[in-house]
Structure formats: structure tokens, C-alpha cells
Image (spheres, grey):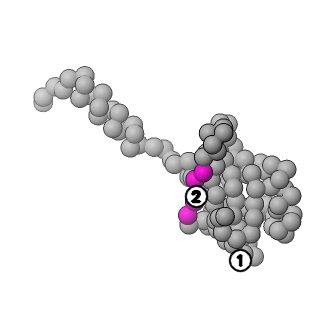
Amino acid sequence: MQECGPDVVFHLVRWFLRGYRMTSRVDRIRGAVRAGRYRLSQHAWEALEEDDFVLADIEAGIESSRWTVKQVDRVTGQRKYVFTGIALDERTISVVCRLESTGRVRVITVFEGGAR
């Protein structure tokens, strides 16, 4: 077997680690919501009530979403994601959230309809 130098090993390890992601952020958000590791902002609670949604609608909307929009806050640089899916009563629901450093999900707002 031929030995390879440290440069080759370094690049192979880097390539492997870059391609080997345990889960994407979207998958981590879905997993955290599935496990109940999420919290709503005051604004999200108000929007939930205003649009006549319940917590289970948020969970169903994130789980059923087929596409997600990633947004980056220009000031803070934080990433937030807009999941658009189907609520329990068959309405379209959009959930704007971010993944916190603790692994919990922070729901920023919720609204009926597709991403704006």
C-alpha cells in the first residue's frame, strides 16, 4: 500500500468533514420541533392567536413544509428560516424561526399563507 503525505491526508479529511454533516440546519430545526424543543416569541404568540392557529399547527407546518426560505439579518447576521406547510385544518401556514445556539428553536412569527 502506498503511503500518502500529510497534505493529502489533510485534504481528504477536510473533504470528508465538509461532506459529512450529521444533519442540515433545516433537519435540526425539524428534529427540535418534533422533540418539543422550541419556544415562541411574544409576537409569535400574538400572531398564532390572531390567525386562529394552535401549537400543533406550527409543528404540522414545519413537518409538512416542502420548501424553506433562508434569510440572513443584515444587522445581526443571524439566519432565520421560513417554513411553509399545511396546518392541521388544511390551511397554509408559514413559520419564521431560527436555531438558537442551545439547539432550541425560536419561533419568531407565524402567519397564514405562503412566504412573503
Residue furthest to the left in view is 1
Magenta span includes 28:
no
Q: Relative to residue 65, is residue 89 depicted above or below?
A: below
Magenta stretch, overall SS: strand
User: Along the polypeptide, which appears first: circle 1 or circle 2?
Assistant: 2
Q: Which mark is residue 64?
A: none
In the structure shown, which secondary structural element does the residue marked by tag 2 occupy? strand
* Along the viewing direction, whichever of 26 and 77 lies nearer the viewer: 77
Among the 4 quarters of the image, the one containing residue 19: top left
Quick check: 46 left or right of 11? Answer: right
Residue annotated with mark 1: 90
When the figure is inspected, residue 85 is found, relative to residue 44, above or below; the finding is below
Answer with the quarter of the image where residue 20 lies: top left
Q: For this view, does 8 lie left or right of residue 56?
A: left
Q: Amino acid at mark 2?
A: Val
Q: Quadrant of the N terminus?
A: top left
Say which residue appears at 56% left-offset and 48% top-offset: 25
- Amino acid found under the numbered disc labelled 1: Glu
| Magenta stretch encompasses residue 70 | yes
Where 115 sits versus 98, above or below?
below
What's the magenta region? 67-71
Label 2 sits on residue:
69
In the rendered view of the protein, which quadrant contains the C terminus? bottom right
What is the residue that sits farthest to the bottom in this orientation? 90
